[in-house]
Amino acid sequence: MPAPDTLTIAIFLLTVALVLLLVLRPGLTASRPGKVLAFVVLFLLPIFCTLIGTSEQIEHTKQTTFCLSCHVMEPYGRSLMVDDPHYIAAAHYQNHRVPADETCYTCHTDYTLYGGVHAKIRGLHHVYVQYLSTPKQPLHLYTPYNNRECLHCHLGARSFEESPTHMALHDDLVSNQMSCLSSGCHDTVHNVAGLNSVKFWNGAKP
Amino acid sequence: MRMPQALEVRLRISGIFVLLGLIIEAAALRWSHPTAFLVFALIGVPLQSIGILIFLYSLIAVRSANGDRSS
């Protein structure tokens, strides 16, 4: 369970205490300082709390546990534990090439809440499907995987830049003309359909 | 100076809504789940907004009541 940071808790507690004071003693607002206090406590502080609360909630949505809390994502969580270095997502997760607590978000930075307007509308659709409908199987990305998600870490890295294959295809990869996940390259990502026939690593689970 | 009864009642109601909103928002922050996000956005924030709107309305209402009295 993620803990909101101490400052956020302190601001919420302070606001609750002051609101409680005004609820119990509304007569305090008869004086001028009391009116200022009421304005701060019943207008400014609640808005501030909502803003920092929203920011915290958005941070929560980046967490691996948040993504995997939807039942439909369970196989994708399991795919991170596959004991096979050819599974790109598993290799990145297990070797901490991506932060373990933000694994999904690190490779899907343009997904739902974090993408453009269309992505945000899709995010609302996910909420609808999660609570009121059933997801269509198999799950798939709305748009082809963008190489930018790989290149924001790998571009400029020695292991990437010194690879003859990467160098030969450099411009095509950077311009997204050719996908990093093309057949014959890094084409085993989550591969959830094949999870029943693979070995799993017994390390730290997401 | 004694406050008008109606203003006291409105401030209390406003405070109770804001308080409920704050408690729900704070509880939602302790939980990392899509439902927590919905509880925060669809229950906590609206309750707080209602409280704030009642507070703002009470300011306008007391001003207009004073204005009516002075005219």
Image: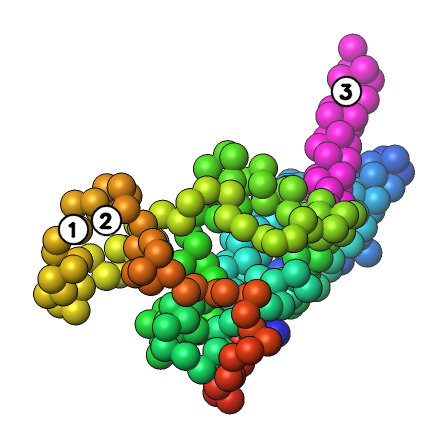
Q: Position of residue A167 (x, y in %)?
A: 12, 56
Q: Chain of mark 2?
A: A
Q: Which residue is mark 2?
A: A173
* Of B24 and A92, the residue lying toward us: A92
Q: Which residue is mark 1?
A: A170
State the residue lying farthest toward the top.
B71
Amino acid at the residue labelled 1: His
Which residue range is magenta in the image?
Answer: B42-71
Q: Chain of mark 1?
A: A
Q: Position of residue B54 (x, y in %)?
A: 77, 36
Residue A9 visible in the picture? no
Amino acid at the residue labelled 2: Leu
Q: Main secondary structure of the magenta part?
A: helix
Residue B64, disc: 3
Q: Position of residue A28 (x, y in %)?
A: 74, 49
Looking at the image, is mark 2 or mark 3 nearer the viewer?
Answer: 2
Q: Check disc 1 and report its element: helix, strand or loop.
A: helix
Residue B1, disc: none
Whether labels 1 and 2 belong to a single chain: the reply is: yes
Circles 1 and 2 in contact, beta carbons < 8 Å: yes
Residue under the image location 65 percent in, 53 percent down: A137
Residue under the image location 11 percent in, 62 percent down: A164
Q: Check disc 2 and report its element: helix, strand or loop.
A: helix
Q: How far is the residue under mark 3 from the one under mark 1?
A: 70 Å
Residue under the image location 51 percent in, 43 percent down: A142
Q: Check disc 3 and report its element: helix, strand or loop.
A: helix
